[in-house]
């Protein structure tokens, strides 16, 4: 069997057989096709994401909105943020004003706040008891990062507000206190 290369001559770049040049050209074409295919796949995924967001009536934040949001996160640590209407919530810290109407989330947040005050009591040798959640923000991760503002009271003392960033998630029901503040509400 004889390989014959039809074209402009040897594509191998050397003095080898013409068949090697053809093989090199085919490999280059395959690599090029894979790149084009990957580029098209990425483009199709982005287009699909845009269609889904449009169907859900969601959009990306504008640069001005993102600047305001980032400033709120920086100033408050994520405990007091606003999200513009219609914005996709993926990857954002989201206020949950009706947390008490979502039984499972409410229970997870209460459990997280109780763990946070228990952690605080141990760390500060205090005896505060959890009273109620005043405000709840969350970020979906592999579970939730809860940004909880809650009230706790020590015996014979006025109630105090606490803020805790608590991870609640995988493994199931894992609670980890990431950050704790004690004091009044920031605004």
Image: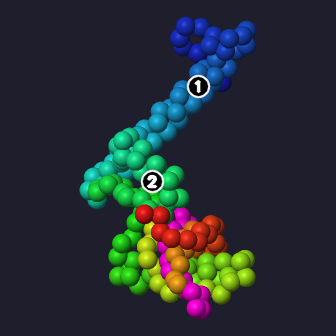
N-terminal-most mark, 2 or 1: 1
> In this rendering, would 58 be left or right of 81?
left
Residue nearer the viewer, 78 or 131: 131
Looking at the image, residue 90 lies above or below residue 66: below
- Give percent across and percent down for residue 67: 42, 44
Let me know if residue 155 is in the magenta part. Answer: yes
- Give percent across and percent down for residue 109: 50, 79
Write down the residue under mark 1: 28
Q: Which residues are magenta?
A: 138-157
Residue 83 seen from this side: yes
Separation (CA) of disc 2 from disc 1: 51 Å
Residue at disc 1, secondary structure: helix
Q: Quadrant of the C terminus?
A: bottom left
**Badge nearest the viewer, 2 or 1:** 2
Write down the residue under mark 2: 72
10 Å neighbourhood of mark 2: few (<14), some, or many (≥20)? some
Residue at 57% in and 31% down: 31
The tally of labels here is 2
């Amino acid at each position: 069997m004889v390989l014959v290369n039809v074209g402009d001559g040897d594509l191998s770049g050397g003095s080898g057989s013409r068949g090697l040049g053809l093989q090199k050209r085919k490999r280059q074409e395959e690599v090029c096709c894979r790149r084009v295919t990957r580029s098209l796949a990425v483009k199709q995924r982005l287009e699909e994401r845009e269609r889904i967001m449009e169907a859900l009536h969601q959009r990306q934040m504008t640069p001005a909105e993102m600047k305001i949001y980032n400033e709120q996160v920086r100033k408050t640590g994520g405990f007091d943020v606003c999200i513009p209407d219609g914005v996709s919530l993926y990857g954002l810290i989201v206020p949950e004003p009706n947390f008490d109407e979502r039984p499972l989330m409410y229970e997870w947040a209460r459990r997280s706040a109780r763990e946070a005050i228990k952690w605080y009591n141990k760390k500060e040798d205090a005896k505060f008891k959890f009273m109620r959640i005043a405000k709840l923000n969350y970020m979906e991760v592999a579970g939730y990062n809860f940004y909880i503002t809650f009230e706790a009271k020590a015996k014979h003392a006025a109630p105090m507000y606490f803020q805790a960033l608590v991870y609640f998630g995988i493994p199931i029901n894992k609670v980890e206190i990431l950050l704790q503040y004690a004091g009044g509400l920031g605004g």
